[in-house]
Image: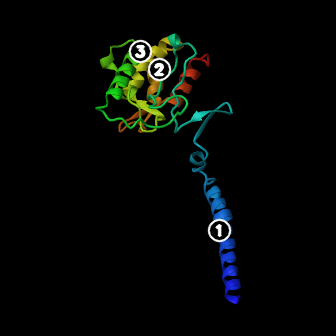
Amino acid sequence: MNTLVKQTWAGLRVLLVMTVLLGLLYPLSVWAIARVPGLEGNAEGSIVTQNGQAVGSSLIGVDPVPADPAHDPWFHTRPSAVGPDMPSGASNKGPDNKDLVKTIEQRKAVVAEREGVSPDQVPPDAVTASGSGLDPAISVAYAELQAPRVARNTGLPLDRVKQLIEQSTSGAGIGVPGVTVLPLNLAVRAAAGGAH
């Protein structure tokens, strides 16, 4: 009986110590580290705010849906491999998959029509989805392809739109310099007087 009591008491002490360590001290230390200056943005989702309102995340690309597709003033991100009911994920289809090839050709036709160019001028990142489907950046080539449409629909001079593209270009691209779409769209909206 004495051994049973000793083992039970030892088990309860271990339970109590682990509860304090892993249930209280560890979560509190992670929370405190996330509040260190310079880390808090990453810990809180890298939220981008404008006029005190959250407008998105600098790490998550969400393709804007224009109210009037015929007068689309926005730069678009890479497509997602999944539907609107599941915004993130990959298709796991290889380059020889007939469905994927057909989807890419359809996307290429849509982008070419929207931008007023031939399908062979559409860059690969405009029609291929990333692993997550939420890349925040596009290639400079895809941004420059969209620039004339954005300029036309916002009333901004094309040179000004190209300046905004250059200001939003960093090393965040797909192995090459990339243009982060959310800040670019915010800059276009600000330059156009917030009309869009």
Which element carries disc 2, helix, strand or loop?
A: helix
Evaluate whether residue 173 shows in this view.
Answer: yes
Q: Is residue 67 above or below residue 176?
A: above
Q: Position of residue 173 (x, y in %)?
A: 40, 36
Q: Nearer the viewer, mark 3 or mark 2?
A: 3
Which residue is identified by label 3?
A: 115
Q: Is residue 29 above or below residue 193?
A: below
Q: Which mark is residue 21?
A: 1
In which quarter of the view is residue 126 placed? top left
Q: CA distance from mark 3 to mark 2?
A: 15 Å
Residue visible at 48% across and 16% down in the picture: 150
Residue visible at 64% across and 59% down in the picture: 27
Number of other residues with Cα within 10 Å of mark 3, as a class: few under 14, some 14 to 19, many 20 or more: some
Q: Position of residue 30 (x, y in %)?
A: 61, 58
Number of other residues with Cα within 10 Å of mark 2, as a class: few under 14, some 14 to 19, many 20 or more: many
Q: Amino acid at mark 3?
A: Glu
Q: Is residue 130 left or right of residue 21?
A: left
Q: How is the image coloured?
A: rainbow
Which element carries disc 3, helix, strand or loop?
A: helix
